[in-house]
Image (cartoon, grey):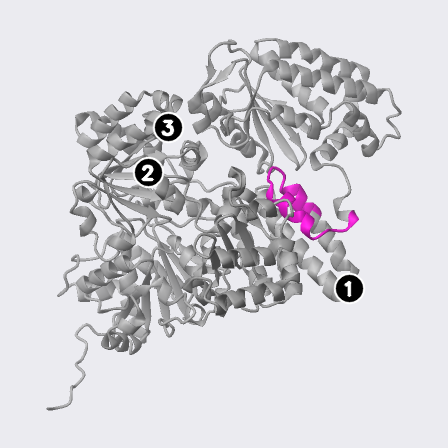
Amino acid sequence: MGFKRRQADPVGVPSDPEQLYRLLARGNRGPDSVWVHQAKVMEHWHGQFRAKGDVALELPTGAGKTLVGGLIAEYLRRAEGSRVAYLCPTRQLAVQTARKLDDYGIPPSLLIGPSRDWDQADLARYQAAGSVAVSTYSHVFNSRPRIDTADVLILDDAHAADGYVSAPWSLRINRRLHESAYKDLLAALSPALDPLLLPHLRSESPGGQYLNAVYLASPAAVAARAGHVESVIREAVAQEKVSNDAVHAWKFLETHVADCLAYVSYREILIRPLIAPTFQHSAFNSPKQRIYMSATLGAGGELERAFGRPKIHRIPVPAGWDKEGTGRRFFVFPELARDLTSDTTVVAPFVQRVIAQAGRVVVLTPETRVADKFRERYLPEGYRTFTAKEVEGDLSDFTSQPAAALVLTNRYDGVDLPDEDCRLVVFDGLPASGDLQEKFLHDSVGAEEVLRERIRARIQQGAGRATRNLRDHAAVVVLGRSLTSYLVRRDIQASMHPEIHAELEVGVDASLDQTSDDVWGNLGIFNSQGPEWSEIEDDIVRNRETYDRQDGPGAAALQQAVRSEVAAANALWSKDHRFALTSIKNVTDQLRNAQTPKRYSSLWSYLGFCVAHRLAETTGEAQFQQTADTYFREARRNSLGTTWFDRVAPVVAPSAAAIEGLDPTDEAAMDSILASKDLWEPEAFQAALAARAGLQETDPDLYEDGLVHLGRLAGASKSYGDPRDGRAAMPDAVWIFGSARWVVWEAKNQATNTGEIGAEQARQAGGHRRTTEKTEGAMAPGDSICVLASPKPKVHESTYNVAEENVYWVQPPLVLELFDTLTRAWQDARARDLQTMSVTALAAIFREHQALPSQWLPTLRQHPLWRTPEE
């Protein structure tokens, strides 16, 4: 038998990826040629970004992302002899990708599942640069990565990779599955937790808020006890008291607990770094290029945080695809319908009816407990259910059933159900619970801006699970107050792809204040895709062409700060605390500008406090304690409106200098009042008091004037009203207390004192904060509120499903009472010697009359519209 001789490649070495496909198309099973937008993306990469270490390509669903990634991979393999690995989130997607590459004439080596089962010939071909490896993220992000010699990584669906990337550095201990290890670790972390929490966390039946909340153990206290904490984890691993995943994570975290954050909830403990230190993971860091492909890229640094990279160059979505999507979706909001909102017990039967009519449904939930409740509450009796694992290799078991539900937990992409495979998607709950860190950032810190791109991507991808081509269509049912109120917000709709923006508007209008019969009828019109729907279709297409996707107001600052965030996280992991402190200073400086999300900044300020505190203890240098005090004050100021800081701050005591002083809003008010020289003059003061009459009137202009003068008496550094120039979206009054807090007003004083406050009024009030942000060119401080003043005696149930957080309802007599309280404080203060009065002295006078903002703000917050009274 003769030697096997290597044959010349009939394709040869192409000059660029587009030419490569012209050669491949002669004998492959793919399209005849690449589309114009695909060619432009590849040309952009080849001409400008071929030598960059990290490059991201945005190609929406249906835009041929796999062909672009495959051609770049094959071009590099042929032209440079590179070993290229194409990574997918799931095995199912890897199988689909390998099939597509084979159709395109690109030789794949499918390397999925346990590595011991891999075809060694396929592995050898990849290692010899004879094929493109197609695998999953877990074979790179692993304590023993098997894809560890790649020259180039193609990372598909990068927007969904945060969990896969952070997994090797995430040590989770679940209370239900590993109770003994959970209790051991809780005991070890207890000195780093607020003592008031511990009885609830140790209880067998904690109250509702303690059951679901996530708490941060003091990083400084954890660092001080890191040796003991590590010994507890080491013993749990040795005694096999934890999961296999925890055992593998411990290989990464051992000796690094002091460099991590520890999150504690009643159900789980998570120890992980804030940003994964991928710089020290050779399998990911060593390749000369990493190409991130996503259907949705955004500003804000989300991609960089997820992958631990300081800079990722972006190639934007091609022209034309920035407007048009794939298929048509009809969003249905049952909890906005009049009769379903007022009686929540009938929501479940309505949803069951929708599911039964559709037959097959894919259900997307953020966490296991939500999925379990969905199965109990919403699935018709006898419905067969499938999980992600049961369909990972083949969806036909699900799609062959006439009545079945595919229930997925924290999985919003990787499942393709086109045409008749599925016509119904159900979202239950806001997709912001990927792990305890994500839940802490969203629920406890309230740093929605830093997670907005992640949430947006999950919603867009999840909504498209059953619309996989231009002619496809599917209904999307939205459940859960958190997700419903999120998607009715106009700023959130504007942040979506223009087509989904238009679809959401139609969906909200078709559900809000409609009856369930109306909603059912609209759903029937959509499902039939007949002439009645054609008119709505025209509206969606027309509207989408007028929309441009809008980044959140803090996105630019977050994008700017991410390089320093990654640098700080890497320095902490490397135990270079001085450089970490320098990088944290850069982060807080970059997040201090006018468009900054203050609550996220507060977390970094607290980390700065902890690092400076550690340096002060280890070096004995007084400058570090002064720095720690400064960061502590910043963290306290920027965390207003949250509870996390109060839970974690007492554990490591700051110096007295860090905690002295007035509440920031009180201080801002007193400063402003002392500076208001005109109001101290008799004529101006009497004119302000005369505005009280307007607060007893139903005339909108007079009432607004009364609110503006009330704001000045309250100590607002700026107090102004609607300029009445036709901008109906403007608030009726705005009170700004420096950088500490805003109070924004929507006055419905002309309304009758009968009936109910409706959902549309709450939506209008909630939007006023964003309108003011545009006017001011600044983000509202964290604890800012919107106040809806109305004489109505009741609130319609649908209002609670629509109202945004920090929207409150007051009745006019309470506003008048506040005016009188402030008047008494002013009269007392004006009787003193103003020339020598200090902020502290003035605050003492106002405190005596219960006239400090910290004293009267709670009276404006007695009736939140974003939470039902029984909650």
Work out how far the residue at label 1 is from the one at label 3, CA to CA, in angstroms: 59 Å
Residue type, mark 1 in image: Gly
Q: Earlier in the sequence, mark 2 or mark 3?
A: 3
The residue stretch that appears in magenta: 633-656
Name the residue beneath numbered marker 2. 376
Residue at the left extreme, as displayed:
1
Name the residue beneath numbered marker 3. 335
Q: Is residue 529 visible?
A: no
Counting other residues with Cα less than 10 Å from the Cα at mark 2, is it few (<14), some (14-19), or many (20 or more)?
Answer: few
Image quarter where the N terminus lies is: bottom left
The image's mark for residue 620 is: 1
Residue in the image at 29% along x and 78% along y: 128
Q: Is residue 26 left or right of residue 151?
A: left
| 639 drawn magenta | yes
Q: Is residue 368 left or right of residue 329?
A: right
Q: Nearer the viewer, residue 185 or 684?
A: 185
Residue in the image at 44% along x and 60% along y: 167
In front: mark 2 or mark 3? Answer: 2
Residue type, mark 2 in image: Glu
Counting other residues with Cα less than 10 Å from the Cα at mark 3, is it few (<14), some (14-19), or many (20 or more)?
Answer: many
